[in-house]
Amino acid sequence: MTEIILVINDIRSTHNVGAILRTSEGMGVNKILISGYSPYPELQNDSRLPHIYNKLTSRISKTSLGAEKMLLIEYCEDIRAELKKLADQDYEIVSLEQSDNSIKIMEYTPKDKLVLILGNELDGVAKEILEISDKVIEIPMLGKKESYNVASSAAIALYHMRFIK
């Protein structure tokens, strides 16, 4: 089974983070890396003030329904450096984003070790992260909207990684 590390980078909404965590737990994601300004639940040895992490944990929990307690979650200050380390450990770095060089998700087969990157709700995955990605995959759209909600996209992509590949 593919080992999956999911990166949540610069996602604003606690509801989206919670939904992504719930889906990640159900899809057997091995580790979650949260970076940028994404809100995250209380972590072991959390350096944030208690009123901050308590408030965020409570909001995230509303949609995660406790999944945050079942996952290995880390906050990462320098996501680019962490991605480079993971690449050196033979992880394939894959961004979920629409771009000129993206491939349709149906055409993608995950490797044994995968880092799947999710980006901001409006702006997507940051350009500097796209530049160091091995692959960029996208979910085709049939309607008139430009993209799916990031939590919905995460669910579609993780399902593909686990069951369709």
Image (spheres, helix red, strand yellow):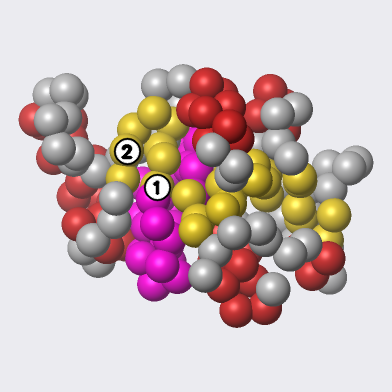
Q: Which mark is residue 32?
A: 1
Q: Quadrant of residue 27?
A: bottom left
- Rendering coords of residue 118 (x, y %): 57, 45
Asked whether the beta carbons under mark 2 and mark 1 sit within 8 Å of each other, the answer is: yes
Q: Is residue 15 above or below residue 86?
A: below
Residue 107: say if magenta: no
State left or right for residue 117 relative to residue 66: right
Stretch of the chain drawn in magenta: 6-31
Viewer-closest of 154 and 160: 160
- Rendering coords of residue 132 (x, y %): 70, 29
- Rendering coords of residue 162 (x, y %): 56, 72
Residue 30: say if magenta: yes
Identified by mark 1, the residue type is Ile
Q: Helix, strand or loop at disc 1?
A: strand
Q: Which mark is residue 74?
A: 2
Q: Quadrant of residue 93?
A: top right
Can residue 35 be seen at all in this image of the molecule? yes
